[in-house]
Image (cartoon, helix red, strand yellow):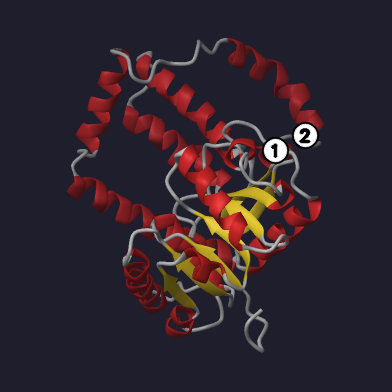
Amino acid sequence: SHSSDNRQQHSAISGLIGRSWAMVFASGGYSVKIYDNQPGQSTKAIVEIKKQLQELEDAQMLRGEATALQQVALISSYDDLSQALEGAFFVQECVFEQLEVKQSIFQDIERLVGKDVILSSSTSCLVPSNVFSKVQNRSRCLVSHPVNPPYYVKLVELVPHPETAPAVMDTTHTLMTKVGQAPVRLRKEIDGFALNRVQAAIIAESWRLVQDGIISVKDIDLVMSEGLGMRYAFIGPMETMHLNAPEGLEDYMKRYGPGIQRVLTSFGPVPDFCGEGSKGIINEMCELIPSDEQHLSARKDRRDQLLMGLAKLKKDH
């Protein structure tokens, strides 16, 4: 800890997810050091963060107690890894999804920090036992997988390495809660973690229904955005079932379990997402939203505005 108000330090990387993490940690009052191995990138990241925080403040959506300028003042940039790591108690890695790159950066980090410093990866698709296989002390390693964009979508999946110490999971859970994220713990690692496994099931059945000529791309999206998603924005599938029968979950399964099993056994094999049959789906989507940068970026902005509004609604309830 470096100052009288007990702020402690984080190190991040300065891409999109790295910038988001820096903003989230700073909103919790922590001092954040960001590092990027491309000279000048981390300085550019702070310029971008300052702009975003000021926009959030103008929209009255800034997280934390401090002003945008006070939060920016907590973030500093480094082109030297050892300087960035000095004084850190928690390190969040955000490099691109390439196993060898992640393995090697954690080897570098481990040489430069004390044994109690927590090493956390933002990976969305690599399991901790692979990411940290070249680290000597794996008891302080875990994956903290955010959901894009993390500033509005607060879920963080905490995924332990088989050797991760329970205290490391606890400390990370407390930290994520303190900075306003919504952490969930996986009890062990599994390919795809929880969010991407559930998402994969939704993608597969949605794809199959369109490919089999049952429903259009536009309408399957409405099934989620105007149907399931309305519930799932506030309560999950387990609670939804529990509330949908007079006597709760056991009653729900007695009434609807056989029907769910019947439907599940009618599902076909995993669809081929890249075969001939997928071309029609892609064309249909591109007619609704062309895949050029201008159209996609306008829709991404709209998405972020809507998520901002939803985050505000959730906060007020």
Taking 234 as reference, is 60 left or right? Answer: left
Quarter location, residue 117: bottom right
Say whether marks 1 and 2 touch (CB < 8 Å).
yes
- The amino acid type of the residue labelled 2 equals Leu
Percent position (x, y) of residue 32?
52, 72
Type of amino acid under label 1: Met
Q: Which residue corresponds to the image point at 66% horizontal and 79% vertical from the top-left?
A: 1
Disc number placed over residue 249 in the picture, else none = 2
Q: Which is nearer the eye, 8 or 251?
A: 8
> Dot 1 surroundings within 10 Å: few (below 14), some, or many (20 or more)?
few
| The C terminus sits in image quarter | bottom right
Q: Secondary structure at mark 2?
A: helix
What x and y, as percent, mark residue 201? 53, 27
- The residue lying at 75 percent from left, 25 percent from top is 253
Looking at the image, which is closer to me, 189 or 136?
A: 136
Badge 1 is on which residue? 238
Name the secondary structure under disc 1.
helix
Please name which of the two marks, 1 or 2, marks the residue nearer to the observer: 1
Q: Quadrant of residue 232?
A: top right
